[in-house]
Amino acid sequence: MNVEESFAKLSDVKPLKTALSRELTIAVMGAGSRGNEYPEYGKLFPDSCRVVAVSDINEYRRNKMAEKWSIPADRVFGDYHEMLEAGKNGKLADILLIALPDDLHFEPAMEAMSQGYDILLEKPMAQTSEECEALLKRQHETGVMVAVGHVLRYSPYFRALKNAIDSGLVGELVSIQHMEPVLYAHMAHSFVRGNWRNSKMTTPMIVAKCCHDMDLLRWIVGKPCTSVKAEGNLFLFRPEKAPEGAPHRCTDGCPYEATCPYSALEIYDRKRWFMYVFDVPKDCPSEQLREILKTSDYGRCVYHCDNDQPDHIVAALRFEGGVTASFTMDAFTPWGGRRTRVMGTMGFIEGDGKTFTLHRFDTGKAHTWAFVPPQGENYKESGHAGGDLALIRDFLEAVDTRDFTKLSSSLDASVESHLMGFSCEKDRLFVSRTALA
Ligand SMILES: NC(=O)c1ccc[n+]([C@@H]2O[C@H](COP(=O)([O-])OP(=O)(O)OC[C@H]3O[C@@H](n4cnc5c(N)ncnc54)[C@H](O)[C@@H]3O)[C@@H](O)[C@H]2O)c1
């Protein structure tokens, strides 16, 4: 096959709809953003999957999900322990979706495996490398199927990029430059004010946010990582960087509010970004939202939060056989969407998360790939460049057929990339301590 033909084949995108032998049932732990995202597949393709039990300590969210899926009252639980307790008398569903906060993944996953559930476990799978290994051991003992939420592996964009490399379009792979631009407001929302602000409460940034990137690099290279080095720190969001006299809340008449790009009033009220965390309609009155911001974590000044996550990280990775990768996570960008450059002996690829261009050294030609969404009612865009719904599709297929090979983000595959992240964090902290000494 010549380059043109190989490149054209990259456009063969797997259809979102799949044929299953029966409808699979799902019990959801954590009816927040992620807990709602994956089951959407069942709404898009009726008879594929259905939520039959829910657990959430937030009454509004669990009731909303119960209503959406007509879940009977005896299958609606508060704390996840109640759902685990009920599962001791027999599984509540074929699949358990664990979409709880990061610090509540390990314990329920361990117990649920023993109860015989196949599990869709949100990333990060656990908070330490020891816990990751323990999960893998339990999975091997129980023989259940576990998928980790490494959704980017399933997005048509990253699949095409990997296929391009695997089919030799850049010759032999030599090195990769990969960047995760977080977006300044997303950093402020999730990693300064929000749920992932403190590495001790959740997981270090390189795992919480960048386990996707460690995972992509390991997956694309296709060989074990043999060494990591990392640097990074919290440059901006610290008390000493606060403008003089800035109050602790944006709602307290901050004199800098009108010009501060991180202002809670600007991000939430005027722009209406990230509204899903407030459990109010996106178009709720300004007064109502400002009242919420007076007490919510999201109304705090970004310089006066209990945060410790780095706002920039650089890492250097080496893989078996000599391939290297450099990785950058940066908060200070005007957009999200991973940027990747791939260097090979015969070609170079540059991509921005939506399209990528292959430049061949032998012909001097450039070939551009872009995702063309299939026409028809059986397609829907989803988060992570389509990865969210594609992951649940493959997971349902794997559970239905008991064919583990249909699953790209297995626990085995995911443990390794989590360990890369934890190793980066260890190295980053070691470097920081040395510098301070
Ligand atoms: N795969 C991805 O790309 C991706 C993207 C975003 C988040 N995540 C991960 O998904 C997980 C969930 O994130 P989210 O954005 O949906 O958060 P979220 O806050 O929207 O949802 C978590 C839900 O868990 C509930 N909860 C908390 N403690 C509970 C308990 N003890 N018992 C029952 N319910 C409880 C909360 O009330 C909340 O509704 C996190 O671990 C996060 O890191 C993954």
Image (tube, rainbow, N blue to C red):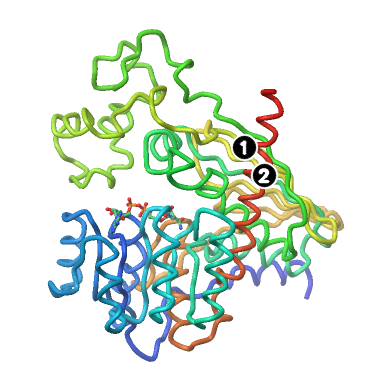
Above or below, comparing residue 432 to residue 229 in the picture:
above
The kind of secondary structure element at disc 2 is strand
- Which one is nearer the viewer's eye here, 358 or 291? 291
Residue 313: assigned label: 1
Crowding near pointer 1: few (<14 within 10 Å), some, many (20+)? many
- Which one is nearer the viewer's eye here, 303 or 135? 135
For the residues labelled 1 and 2, the Cα–Cα distance comes to 8 Å
On screen, residue 285 versus residue 87, left or right, reads left
Q: Residue 382 placed where, x, y %? A: 40, 60
Q: Residue 12 placed where, x, y %? A: 58, 73
Assign ligand 1 to one image quadrant.
bottom left
Quadrant where the C terminus lies? top right
Q: Residue 204 placed where, x, y %? A: 53, 44
On screen, residue 194 versus residue 8, left or right, reads left
In the rendered structure, which amino acid carries the disc numbered 2? Phe
Q: Are marks 1 and 2 in contact (CB under 8 Å)?
A: yes
**Residue visible at 34% across and 89% down?**
22
**Residue visible at 55% across and 68% down?**
409
Q: How many marks?
A: 2
User: Which corner quadrant of the image does residue 83 belong to?
Assistant: bottom left
Task: Name the N-terminal-most of marks 1 and 2.
Answer: 1
| Residue corresponding to mark 2 | 327
In the rendered structure, which amino acid carries the disc numbered 1? Ile
Which residue sits furthest top?
Answer: 244
Q: Residue 28 placed where, x, y %? A: 30, 68
Residue 378: assigned label: none
Above or below, comparing residue 145 to residue 357 in the picture:
below
Crowding near pointer 2: few (<14 within 10 Å), some, many (20+)? many
On screen, residue 264 versus residue 399, left or right, reads left
**Residue visible at 28% across and 47% down?**
276
**Residue visible at 69% across and 66% down?**
7
Quadrant where the N terminus lies? bottom right
